Every structure is written in C-alpha cells, then in structure tokens.
Image (cartoon, rainbow, N blue to C red):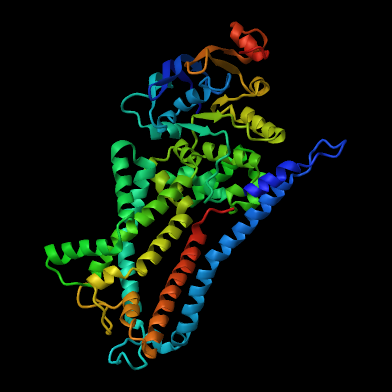
Amino acid sequence: MAQRIDVKDVSIYYGSFKAVEDVSMTIEARSVTAFIGPSGCGKSTFLRTLNRMHEVVPGGRVDGTIELNGQNLYAAGTDPVAVRRTVGMVFQRPNPFPTMSIFDNVAAGLRLNGERNKKRLTEVVEKSLRGANLWDEVKDRLAKPGAGLSGGQQQRLCIARAIAVEPQVLLMDEPCSALDPISTLAIEDLISEIKQNYTIVIVTHNMQQAARVSDRTAFFNLQATGRPGHLIEMDDTTKIFSNPTEKATEDYISGRFG
Amino acid sequence: MSTVASTDRGTRPTPPSGSLVPQISRRRVAVDRIVTILVWVAFFLAVVPLAWILWTVLSKGFSLVLDSHWWTNSQAGISPRREGGGAYHAIVGTILMAVVTAVIAVPLAVFTAIYLVEYGRGRLARVVSFMVDILTGIPSIVAALFIYAVWVGVFRQQRVGFAVSLALVLLMIPVVTRSTEEMLKLVPNELREASYALGVPKWKTISRIVLPTALSGIITGILLGLARVMGETAPLIILAPYTAFINVDLFGGNMAALPTLIYTNFGNNIQPQLDRMWAAALTLILLVLVLNIAGRFVARFSAVRR
C-alpha cells in the first residue's frame, strides 16, 4: 500500500520569489518522516509540493522531480487531482466541512469522487473512524455535525476523512499545533499505529514530537529572511537528535539558533 | 468634546497611595456617556421613520387587505371612484415578473460571483468587477429606457411584462453578484484546500463544498435583490402599461403590477382610491416579508450546522 518518495533537485517558487532551493531526499515507505526547522524555512511549502497542493496558491510553481514509486508526480501528463487522491493531507487547523455530519465528512472524499454505494460507504466510514481512533467516541452520533466535536476529535475526524480515500502517503502539516497535550498524545499514538500502512510525512515545530513519532528527520533552515530555505540534513531521528552531522542542526536542536 | 477635555485636564485623579491601578479618568467617563447618548439618538432617528412607515401603511391599508376579495378579484369593471375589486391582477403580475427576473438574473449573477471569487485573475476579472460596479449605479429608469430602445426600437416588439423582467434583470444582477461575492469570500480557504487534498476537482469543490457553505447568505442576497426589484416602478411605467384586467401572458398585452396599481390610484384624493393605494403598498410589503420567511426556511435546511 505505502510507497516511497524520491525528491530530486526541487526548488519552489511563489511568483518570482524562491521559497525553497534545491531539495533532494528519499522518504521511506511505511515510516514516519518529520520535517523540522524555524518558521519560514519552507518545510510546510515543501510538504505541500508532495501532493501538488502548492500550485493552488496563485503564482505557485515547482521545479525538479518528485517520484512516487518511480512515477514523476510533476510529469506533463500527470493530473494533480489524481496525485491528491494518492497523497492525502491533514492540515494545521482541523477543518471539517461545516455543512456535513460526521458521517458525511468521512464519506466526503469517496462521495465527491462518485461512490454511491451506501453499504460500501458505511463500511469505509466505520473502518476509517476506527483507524483514526474516533469510532467509539462518535458511533452514536454519526448524523451530528462534525463541527460540534472538540478540537482533538475534529483533527482525528480530518485524519479519518483523509484515510477514507485510501491514499498511499499521508502528509501532516503541524497536525497537533492547535491541540492540547492529551489530544496531541492521541494523534501521536495514532501516527505510530497507522505507519504500518502508510508513508507518513509530518511537519512539526515540536522537537519532542519529532523525536517521539518519527523514524527519520529532515532539518530545514534559511540563511536570512527573504532568502530561500534549504534542506540542511536528513538522517535517522536518533542520529539527528543525538549526534547530527551539521553544526546548524545541533544549534537548532539545542536551542542555540539565530 | 473640547470642553470635556479641558475640564478634565486640571482634575486628573491621582491614584490613592498604595494602589497600582489609577482610577478611571473623568474624561473617559464623560466621553463614554456622550457617545452612548449619541448612539441611542442615532438609533431612534433611524427607527422612528421605519415605525412611522409601517404604522401608516398598516393603519391605512389593513381594512382592504383583510377582505378576501382583495386577494381574489381584479379591478375589472370597477369604476375608480367606487369601492370594490381587488389586487389579484397586480399580485399575479408582480410575482410573474419577479419570478422570470430571478430565473434569468440569479444564475448569471451567481456564476459571475463564482468567476470573480474562484477563478478570476488579472485583467478580465478587473473588467468584470468594474462592469458590475457600473451596473450597480444605473438608475432604474435608465435600465428601462435601454430595454425600451432594444425591445421596442430594435426588435419592434410590443411593451409586455417580459420586457419589464429584462430591465429588472439589469437591476438585480449587480445586487446579487456583490452579495454572493461577499458570501463566497467568507468561506474559509481551508475548506477548499481540505477538499482538494481529498482529490476532489475544483468545480466539484465549488459546487459541493463552497456553495453549500455559503448558501444561506447567497439566498439572503437573492431575496434582498428580489425585494428591491419588486418595488421598482420606472420599468413598469415605461414597459408595461397598467391594466385593470388579469393578464398572465408575459409576452402579450398590458400587465398590472403592485407599484403601478399604487401609482394609478395616486393623486385624486378620493377615499376608495386612497384605500386601494395603501392596501397595495401593504400587499407589496407583505409579499417581500413572505419571501424573506420562505428564504430563511429554505436556507435553514442546508445551512452550516453547528
């Protein structure tokens, strides 16, 4: 199910502004990869290029190649809509659809792509909600609006919604930054559980979180504001947090940056 | 205001010893009181005319409106100086013209707003937006004259109800476009992104996520536009001469409407005519009220759920 991603020489632009320069990396299948780095270093922007969400921003443009299992996501004939079905995403702020019930939120991805079979939808919704550790909390009120849940539940609802379309890869853009520690723990447990089936990439500002959940960590940095962000180094998480190769990484992790 | 400031300056209160937080200054208390009074005065100035209008129309119009003949009969065969007859012909005319106007104007306006908010970039969007602004500023009589010039002048057609609808379309499009635009802009971008991230194409994101989220606001805008359009008189005078008879054919013959019923009965100062005039005014207000309530009812079914 899960597949690996090979990134080669990717530069990302907003109009004429180069936000990220020359990133190459390999993201392993069935593992959790964390992106860390200071604000504005382009880690979220880079994450959004992995499912071609960057180009929905006016002026957004990407150079280089990103291959999912050998297939270039940025090849001329590739449909960005199809890419996003394969590479799902969870956002910083929980964003359930406000017009929809809990059930409809989880079913949205399938329904909007044409699935009408009630029985299959019911199965997928239950499976996804179980997968997101939310089933027991909401099974009695599936018809209630999704916006009525707590912040942590809403974020797990969004994860359920994302995995309902059975993507190969799950991108998470600071999924816990709007949540309290208990909800954060619930999401982190969830990440460790579902990594057997998905390739997971998570952007986080919380270095303990990166150390807790990820197998590999990539550190992004920028020389100054207005300059493009770079990938400084990428390695096993234990190595990055104990004995990083680059001095910049060590400075950032130990709090001596700037 | 300056007097408040000057009296205050000499007597700024000193905090009592031991207190870190100074007491609220007299100047702020005075300003607060003055502004509160001003706001209340402004509120009453705004409410008094509204209450006055409602009271006048209700007190002068209600006796005829309560009569069931008013809702079922036309003015056919009734001498203007005599009592009797109803407004059925005018109500039917107003509703028919309003429905046709809405059927033409709403899709145009909503699609224009969708273009401006979701797709429009660069020059074309700026031109379209500018055109909508210009359309907003067109007086109703100019819109009516334009349609007259095209309908009667160029196409050699009779003056009929449909021509009125065309003129009203010109007046309704900018109102609905602007209100729909505002409502679509209020839909958070995160919802669009959430939908894209599920692999949903843009058009489906707009039709299934963005529009339903903004629906109640869009409907409110449409109803406001309709309310404005139903009271327009200039296009009726120019394009649809009043008749006392019932006519449901938008493409043939004269057609009555509530504003022209009011206008026809205005000016002679005879009691039966005055009664009819006020009753027609009240009927128009009631029609808009019913539309509003119906719209709210529809919006509630698909509104944002909490």
Quadrant (top left, top right, bottom left, bottom right) of the C terminus of chain A = top right
Left or right of A192, for residue A74? left
Given residues B287 and B100, the one toward you in this image is B287
Q: Image point 20% across, 78% down: which residue? A: B253
Looking at the picture, does residue A142 appear above or below residue B284?
above
Image spot of residue B250 (x, y percent):
24, 73
Residue B276 position by quadrant: bottom left
Q: How many marks?
A: 0
Residue B273 position by quadrant: bottom left
Given residues A142 and B167, the one toward you in this image is B167
Image spot of residue A17 (x, y percent):
41, 21
Looking at the picture, does residue A239 appear above or below residue B200?
above
Image spot of residue A245 (x, y percent):
60, 5
Left or right of A54, for residue A224? right
Image spot of residue B239 (x, y percent):
23, 70
Q: Image point 45% across, 60% down: which residue? A: B220
Taking the view exactly as shown, the residue that stands out farthest to the right is B18
